[in-house]
Image (spheres, helix red, strand yellow):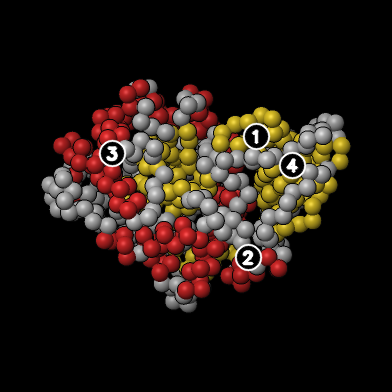
Amino acid sequence: MIPCPLATMLRPALVPAAVMATALVPSAGRADSLPPVAASNVSVWVTARDTGDRLASKPPVPFAALEQPEEHAPTVIVDSSKLFQTIEGFGGALTDASAETWAKLPAERQQELLRAYFDPEKGIGYSLCRTHIHSCDFSSESYAYTEVPGDVTLQHFSLEHDRRHKLPFIKAALRAAAGPVKIFASPWSPPAWMKTNGNMLQGGQLKPEYREAWARYFVRFVEEYEKEGVPIWGLTVQNEPMATQTWESCIFTGAEERDFVRDHLGPALEKAGLSRLKLMIWDHNRGILFQRAKAVYDDPAAARYVWGAGFHWYVGDHFENVRQVHDAWPDKQLLFTEGTPSHFDKATLGEWKWGEIYATSILHDLNNWAAGWTDWNVLLDERGGPNHVGNLCIAPVHGDTGTGELTYTNSYWYIGHVSRFVRPGARRIACTSNDDDLLASAFVHPGGRVVTVVLNKTDKAKDVLLWMDGRAAKLKSPAHSILTLESMVATD
């Protein structure tokens, strides 16, 4: 993982824990419980720089009749009759680092964090989360579930390490959520004894003689996690398969990934009765997403096992590449599986544009057919770790393991403008903006509730119209803000 390309240009902001404590209390007028949406009004929530507004509820704005939008007035145009992909959910990664940091917090802060992320009314309603299969860089040490060389029968397979912190954290998150949370898992490397370099770190490749055992290792992980009460929704074949990292990593070419899925992993999951799992290829950057998808999808014997492709945001934005994959293989899904905006620097946590980096990616990816979006670590400590190779990063929330305090960067609020309001099962709908300064996306839920998200990254406040169904509502888009707008499909 390396810094997001946007982060090299944009420096983003910090909201003190005191603001957060207020913001999650409905009586304080922040992040209130979602009221019914009146068909004649637009409900408005806003987060804006240079204000105290953080997911703040504003007075509803009435619709007025307008036959067609004006060309020269900033307008977001929504058509709920044009339906696109179904949304799977939004969330972040439940890593060893997050779990270890959470375990060191006071009990009241632990519960606050769980509410903040997983409560859909008092928090931001995470519904899709990632975890790792044995260790990754955001673990305090490197480990595998069996480290006995040649243990192809997995006789020594054990989750004992995960039972210390990660499993209790995941279980607590599942309990805190009001509804199901889909969890998918990714390996950073096979065990050292399965690899050409004899090391979980520094790249290397899976030895051909261990392909079958590695496939059964996936199966065993799923089975053991589900015995622990943690259902698994999906898997990725390999995290960042083209990156030789100082941490856990393993190289797969496109042909090697195709062959492993076709000849080993797919059949192993099928034999174990786990064909329901959403198997994803690639799990790396958008840059060569199309070529890696082609390597697998053009082989029907491999493609039949694959639900879709995961992707990250490092080394260039390349948003259009996501759409190209959808257009070429519309039966396959797309999921953003990891992004973090920068390496940790405590001095920059308070800069505003961290949230804008997230929102820019989320809205572009959704508009280009992603079915969901997952951030990287949900929680890190006061140093941006723990991380056993010093690859310290920024998270939406940091916990000080000395004082027990939580610090919420503005990334948390920006993600929440989508994750809290766009629920699993919603459909993306047609949404266009006639103003280059406004990026928007819109969704409709069963029952007709429409959610439109509008991002303004400029220094200019704007009057903007939300136009749909021959009616328009006049809204304020503050400088450096994100709006979530709720309305209902017109029935008259």
Q: Is residue 371 above or below residue 290?
A: below
- Cα distance, mark 4 to mark 3? 44 Å
* 353 or 93, nearer to the observer: 93
- The answer to which quarter of the image holds residue 264 is top left
Check whether the beta carbons of the residues at disc 2 and disc 1 lie within 8 A of each other: no
Tell me if 285 is positioned left or right of 7 in this view: left
Q: Is residue 108 above or below residue 42?
A: below
- Cα distance, mark 2 to mark 4? 26 Å
Where's residue 304, x and y in %?
37, 27
Query: The disc labelled 2 sits on which kind of residue?
Result: Leu
Which residue is tagged 3? 272
Which residue is tagged 4? 488
Residue 179's disc is none
Q: Earlier in the sequence, mark 4 or mark 3?
A: 3
Where's residue 372, x and y in %?
52, 42
Q: Earlier in the sequence, mark 2 or mark 1?
A: 2
Task: Report the mark closest to the observer, 3 or 1.
Answer: 3
* 135 or 60, nearer to the observer: 60
Q: Residues within 10 Å of mark 3 (few under 14, many from 20)?
A: few
Residue 429's disc is 1
